Structure formats: C-alpha cells, structure tokens
Image (spheres, helix red, strand yellow):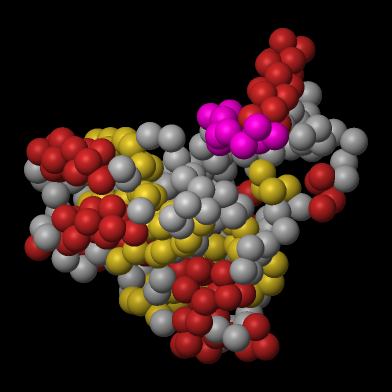
Amino acid sequence: MAPILTAALYHFATLPDCAALRAPLQALCDAQGVRGLLLLAPEGINGTIAGSEDGVRAVLAHLRGDPRLAALRHKEAWGERMPFYRMRVRLKREIVTLGVPGLDPARHAGTYVKPRDWNALIDDPNVVVVDVRNDYEVGIGSFERAINPHTRQFADFPAWVERESQPGGVLAGQPRVAMFCTGGIRCEKSTALLKARGFAEVYHLEGGILQYLEDVAPQDSRWHGNCFVFDERVSVGHGLAPGHHSLCRACRMPLGEAERASPHYVAGVSCPYCHGTRTPAQLQALAERERQVALAERRGHAHIGAHPPAAPGGEPAP
C-alpha cells in the first residue's frame, strides 16, 4: 500500500470571495481522492488534508495558484493509513475562532522570531512569555517561563488579555510579549489582537512549537514535555518523534501514563477527565463502539468509530 501524505496548512489572506472558492476546491479534492477538512473564511484558509502524494500536492498547487495564497506554508507527515473518512470544505466566519471583529492578521500580526533566535528572546526576564494554546495542550508540555492562560478554547483568550492588562496583571503596562502555539495560526491572530490593544512589541515563534522541535537540538532546548498535535500521533517531542500520549476516545483529552493507570480509565469509554459525566446508556454505547472498533481491527478493516470527535474547543490548528 502506498504511504499516505498528510498536510497541515493555514494562511491568512483577504478572501472576500471565499464562498466562490469552495465548490472548485471540493471538486478537486474529491477527484484526487484527498480527504480531510479545509476551512475557508474572508480572512484565509486553515485545515488538514491527506491522500496520495500526487493528490495532496495537486491540491496544494491549486491553492498556491491563487496569488493571495501563493505564500501558503504547510507541514507534512507520512503514515500508513488514511486518517480521514471524507473530505469537507467548509465556510466559516474565521479560520480559527477568536471572536474579535476587525482583526487583520495578514497585515497586523506581531514580529516573527525564528526558532534559532527564540531562546534568547524568552530568556530575557523583561519579556512576558505566553502560551496561547488551550489548557489541556499546555498540560502535557510548554516552554520555560511560559504563562498558561488556562483557556478552554481560543475564544476565551481576549477576556484573559483584558483581565491581565489591568493593574497588577502580567500584561499591565504593555510589556514586551512573546507568544507561541502549535504551528503559528493562533499566534498570528493573538499577536494581531495585542497590537490592536496598543502593545508595541509583540513577537511570535515562526512555525510554532513544531518548527522549534524540528530545528532546535534537545540539549539547547527550553521546551519541556510533549506537544499535543491534532492528528493520530497525539503528541510529539524533539525531532517530531511520536510522544507517549494517547487519546481518550470518549472525550479526546490527551492521556499520559498516569491517566491510563487511573481506575477511571476504561479504553474507549472514560478517563479521569470525563469520568462521571455520562449516563449509563451513553457508557454502554461507548463500550459497544469500542468493541466494534476492536473487532474491525482484528479483521483488518477500518471502522469509523476509531476516529474520535474534535478536540475540546478545537478546530484544525496547525
């Protein structure tokens, strides 16, 4: 079987005609046997697709054929099986939901900092380092000195900025701020938010955590733990080697060894995070789904139940 290429991508660009782009893009993906999810909005494109190398590259070439998306960047991963069951191209108000009208990350994002220069920036005690990911992502790994806003979803971030900008908050007085996320998309938008709020010196990690883990040697790293990723790898470490986390197939929270050792963990049914939140009938349905998934695997078949629902508060977030 030919290997499967997965491409995670995003690009902020002014696309007032995004609705007209949807049908041709969907048709091309279907013709090429490419599956996944792409979000189109007036502010750009975001998503993850998978398929044969020729198919994925044909879709990427089509996107970059639009001059507004010519600078689109993507991250690649190879696998042995297709991670998606269908292809969806959806229209959204935002490609990553922050809920603040009027932001223009394509023109007003913060200053990029390359991974090789990131350590020097976050080592500066006068720089406030902010992890803009969700709380469950921060829980399995982050940078030294990074502040965790404890957001459940990205749309909670503006309220945290407003609160911490008040006297006594970590953002009071508009200090220099360095921000990071998984692949860069949330940082571009959050730095645009801070600049709109009057912050003059706002920086973000170019290529996100994934690029840092790929470029920076472990002995020089300021990163601790693993990085949650929005695919079947669940987490990665330096060199993008797969981490040791799995997903709760009931609530999609990342689980380490401690969570899997919990008496509340039942594969496919519950974990310490979702234990006690479901009715007996729901638990029975989850257990039956897990039984069917295991049966399909023994027979060498794919089963749609093997793919969990979206991450908590999650959208595609390269």
- Where is residue 119? Give x, y as percent: 55, 85
Q: Quadrant location of the C terminus?
A: bottom left
307 in magenta: yes
- Where is residue 158? Give x, y as percent: 43, 49
Q: Residue furthest top?
A: 281
- Where is residue 57? Give x, y as percent: 27, 60
Residue 277 shows in the view: no
Q: Residue 250, relative to residue 52: is it above or below?
A: above
Residue 239 shows in the view: yes
- Where is residue 302? Give x, y as percent: 55, 34
Query: Of residues 242 and 228, which is closer to you in this image?
Result: 242
Q: Residue 228, relative to residue 42: is it above or below?
A: below
The magenta segment is 297-308
Task: Give the residue at x 63% y 88%.
Answer: 220
Q: In this view, does 234 lie to the left or right of 43?
A: right
Query: Of residues 167 and 100, which is closer to you in this image?
Result: 100
Task: Give the residue at x 14% y 49%.
Answer: 15
Report which quarter residue 224 is drawn in: bottom right
Task: Give the residue at x 78% y 24%.
Answer: 276
Q: Residue 203, relative to residue 304: is it above or below?
A: below
Report which quarter residue 226 is drawn in: bottom right
Query: Of residues 296 and 120, which is closer to you in this image?
Result: 296
How many dots with numbers?
A: 0
Q: Is residue 157 left or right of residue 107?
A: right
Task: Give the residue at x 57% y 49%.
Answer: 232
235 in magenta: no
